[in-house]
Amino acid sequence: MMKKIERALISVSDKSGIVPLATALASTGTEIVSTGGTAALLESKGISVTRIDSVTGFPEMLGGRVRTLHPRVFGGILGRRAIESDVAEMREHQIPPIDLVVVSFYPFSETAAREGATESDIIEKIDIGGPALLRAAAKSFADVAILHHPDQYDPFLEALRSDAGVTLKYRRTLTRSAFQEVARYDEAIRDWFGGPESESETNSNAQITISAARQQKLRYGENPHQKAAWYTTEEQSLRFTALQGKELSYNNLLDADAAWRLIEEFDDPAVAIIKHGNPCGVATGGDLSGCFRRALAGDSISAFGGIVAVNREVDGPLAEELASLFIEVVIAERFSNGSRERLARKKRVRLVEVDRIAGHAQNREIRSTAAGLLVQDRDEAGASEDEWRVVTKRIPTEQEMADLRFAWKVAKHVRSNAIVLARDGAMIGVGAGQMSRIDSVRFAVEKAVAMNHDVRGSALASDGFFPFPDGVQNGAEAGAAAIIQPGGSIRDDEVIAEADRLGIAMILTGRRHFRH
């Protein structure tokens, strides 16, 4: 066990919490060796510091590129205390052993993401000494402890003060975390050197490294017998913060993600209600309360126990509407004080605020299979409307065009085979996840009729092409007036001819939106 730290090397870019840590160590008689700005900070707080150049006999040089890269530093870390020849060599060359290494890397990702950062700025934030120190200390975990994040400082001090001390098991845990940090850092640098074009070429990397920190243990996964946890990654573009209610569950997080991806499609005020990964209600335009009522009308039965996403601040009137329904989660960028007070009475409902992480764009999706990992670019952007083609004799009216745009955005977020019926900026029917597209059309119509919606004059969106004219026939028989779909079937001509016969306007987008 490790009960005393004789000598600690501290060199951190992120100086959060470093003064309390160094103060606590110094109070036990630990000699603190430090570099550059870290040393200056500690000295300014009255903490005695041994400057790195007094250990190495060389000044920090080359604009700070060379500080710790010296045998007297790495020998003090890598020297094995249990091997007599190592100890003898350290004594011969006057290499003092180092028991604790505290390192955090230069902010490479933050600099690369900063608007206006030059290539020279970014290159200088490629840390050399930090990862080398981290690896050396991790390799010597039998004799050396290592910390690389402020969150580790307090638990380490607690362990140091405990009867057990800093155990070998604990040092192995710190070592694993250290190597994960190096892998994460190196991956960010590798990806940056891939250039901007690599962001959309997910399949260009022969190997990927995924580093994730556990955010929270979850009560269970999709079902109570499945263990689960929530991890956050360096490349995530959003941060979810729970404001009230029970802990978020595995299914809550999946549905919240689906809800937020959908709601971000709209610039106008919009409300989406998600159930089991699929929208059961979506509406846009007007005030939020009105949006919610129209979204709820899409399928008021399925909305029970759903997830609600809002692309504006949740205000008092909307909170009153939300309080009338059993909802699992409400997710938005902001909640007014009045809305939080009102929804606080609904103790079961979870309120989640969303923060966009500046400079981060999550451009890939990763899914696990028994045969490995599947990696793809996110389905972020649809084809430009400049690429859309009206292929029927009848051109959509202005209102039909607005509803087609709306339906197309929603269909992108419905499980394939997906059919969406929309009118006046609201979804009135949906067919999701069916093995047959004709069944999806039938279910969308049945759902609309069951909710007392008038399908006549509505817009119909299909995430994939119609393989036969029957889907168009069924939509037209129900009253759909305009259809939007990707096209690409060998029977496109037959499908278009049927639309012309039925007097339906049809647009081909040239891009599909399967979501499995």
Image (cartoon, rainbow, N blue to C red):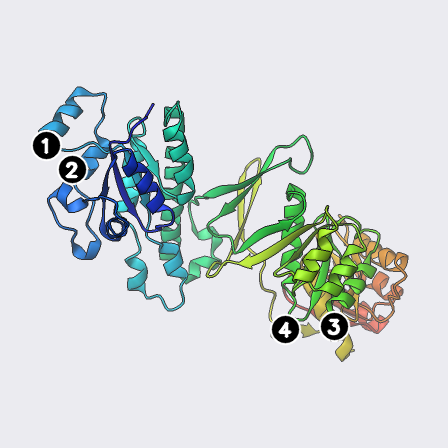
The residue indicated by pointer 3 is: 286
x then y, percent, for residue 396: 76, 76
Specify the amino acid type for callout 2: Arg
Against 38, residue 226 (above or below) is above
Q: Classify mark 1: helix, strand or loop.
A: loop
The residue indicated by pointer 4 is: 385
Q: Nearer the viewer, mark 4 or mark 1?
A: 1
Left or right of 82 in this view: 112: right
Q: Classify mark 3: helix, strand or loop.
A: loop
Specify the amino acid type for callout 3: Gly
CA distance for labels 4 and 1: 72 Å
Residue at 36% across, 51% down:
190
Disc 3 crowd, CA 10 A, few/some/many (<14, 14-19, 20+): few
Q: Nearer the viewer, mark 4 or mark 2?
A: 2
Location of residue 296 by image quarter = bottom right
Disc 1 crowd, CA 10 A, few/some/many (<14, 14-19, 20+): few
CA distance for labels 4 and 3: 24 Å
The one of 467 and 152 positioned closer to us in this rendering: 152
In primary-sequence order, the first of circles 1 and 2 is 2
Q: Which mark is residue 72?
A: 2
Specify the amino acid type for callout 4: Glu
CA distance for labels 1 and 2: 8 Å
